[in-house]
Amino acid sequence: MKSAVLAAASALLLGQTAAAQDGFYYGIGLGLTESSTNSPIVSDYTAAATDVSLALTAGYRFAGTGALTYGIEGNLDILGGATMNDGTDACTGTSPSWCTIDTVLRLRGTLTNQLAGGGQLTWSLGAVMVKGVSENGPGNNLDTTGRGLSVGLGWQPAGGMPVRIDVNYDAIRDDNQPAYERDLNLLGLRVSYMF
């Protein structure tokens, strides 16, 4: 019991640093991601999936002036690996598109605005990398790494628990399997407890 109380008190004290103007911060939470994929060679097939994820965040805010601070942030989403489909599962010879996404890694610059009511609004822009499986011809499903552009908007309310809600959009237009061109779009919602 003593250990549980000590751990809870430590977490609450560490949680207060998430609202600091500058310095390191990190978070852990859950995410929900809607993914969709298409290959121009079979333009009428667009597969989609909704997946849950473990959402990890680490970042650094530089000292700023006034209500604005700049920073750098990394996000790691570990997804459940749901198979995308359009009535027919991806990776069944229908289209050389993405089949599943396992991991999403983002590295972005951030601009945080301290709101008058005490909350924070954070805009972010940067790069995204995804790992999953894509179809490269019937029966030829390969581990694939894709790269693209990522934008996000996060809101951390004032007072109470240091919780942040993020909405992210990731556009992946390049991958390491050059036999076929394919697009992947991710729209995600993350809720994280920030430390």
Image (cartoon, rainbow, N blue to C red):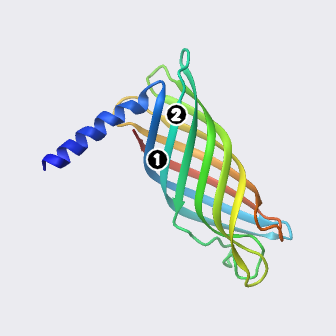
Q: Residue at x 75, y 70 (%)?
A: 97
Q: How many marks?
A: 2
Q: Which of these two is toward me, 134 or 143?
A: 143
In the image, residue 155 above or below residue 89:
above
Q: Position of residue 76 (x, y in %)?
A: 54, 52
**Callout 1: SS:** strand
Q: Compare residues 150 and 25 and report the one nearer the observer.
A: 25
**Residue under the point 24% across and 43% down:** 8
Q: Residue furthest bottom?
A: 139
The residue sitting at 65% across, 48% down in the picture is: 169
State how far apart marks 2 and 1 are (Cα).
19 Å
In percent of width and height, residue 33 lies at 57, 57
The C terminus: image quadrant? top left
Describe the element under mark 2 as helix, strand or loop.
strand
Question: Which amino acid, by three-letter code, is at mark 2?
Answer: Tyr
Residue projecting furthest to the right: 41
* Residue displayed at 65% across by 58% down: 130
Residue pointed to by mark 2: 60
| Image quarter of residue 112 | top right
Mark identifier at residue 191: 1
Label 2: few (<14), some (14–19) or many (≥20) C-alpha neighbours in 10 Å: some
Q: Position of residue 39 (x, y in %)?
A: 80, 67
Residue 188 percent location from the top left of the image = 58, 52
